[in-house]
Image: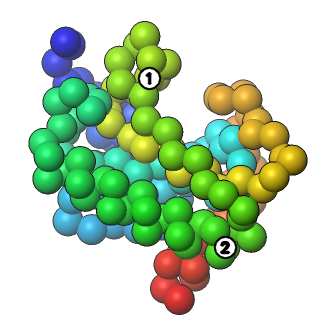
Amino acid sequence: MTAYDDQNVFAKVLRGEIPCFEVFRDERSLAFLDIMPRSPGHALVIPRAPARGILDITDDDLAAVIRTARRIAVAAMKAFDAEGIILQQFSEPASGQVVFHLHMHVMPVRAGVELLPAQTRKEDMAVLADHAKRLIAALAS
């Protein structure tokens, strides 16, 4: 397995070198909006610790990511009037992983509404700002 690269885009987000639409942070995880969402409210949850994928993350850091993903999923159901949630995690290139820092996709969905294709359309920043506000408000309620 390839070693963790601390120059990946999510490591840069964690260091504040690249901005994000942050919606939640605790001592072990960070949740922020995907800038190329597949559905309204599509968020990413990452560990704050360096981990390339599920094959090299510690049990405690993985548990923190899962807890945060659940918290984001519950809030996204409210904030986006969703009927369901898709959680996705890819590890290593053969699985489709593109950014080599473990991340879990949290995508609110509605029956009959197709997800947009992955990595095809960058969302308008004003829309993302609105979605972040809605998700943060739902997290607080």
Callout 1: SS = loop
Residue at 66 percent of width and 73 percent of height: 79
In depth, the one of 119 and 93 nearer the eye is: 93
Residue 48 in view here: no
In the rendered structure, the answer to whether residue 76 lies left or right of residue 101 reads: right
Q: Earlier in the sequence, mark 1 or mark 2?
A: 2
Residue at 65 percent of width and 75 percent of height: 78
Instruction: Give how far across and how far down residue 52 sits, in percent.
Output: 26, 29
In depth, the one of 110 and 1 nearer the eye is: 110
Please give the residue where the numbered disc 2 appears in the rendered image.
Answer: 79
Total number of numbered discs in the rendering: 2
Q: Do tag 1 and tag 2 residues touch (Cβ < 8 Å)?
A: no
Please give the residue where the numbered disc 1 appears in the rendered image.
Answer: 97
Instruction: Give how far across and how far down residue 38 sits, in percent.
Output: 69, 41
Instruction: Give how far across and how far down residue 75 sits, in percent.
Output: 55, 72
In the image, which disc is placed on residue 84?
Answer: none
Instruction: Give how far across and how far down residue 31 sits, in percent.
Output: 42, 58
Label 1, label 2: how many angstroms apart (C-alpha)? 28 Å
Relative to 7, say whether 93 is above or below. Answer: above
State which quarter of the image contains the N terminus: top left
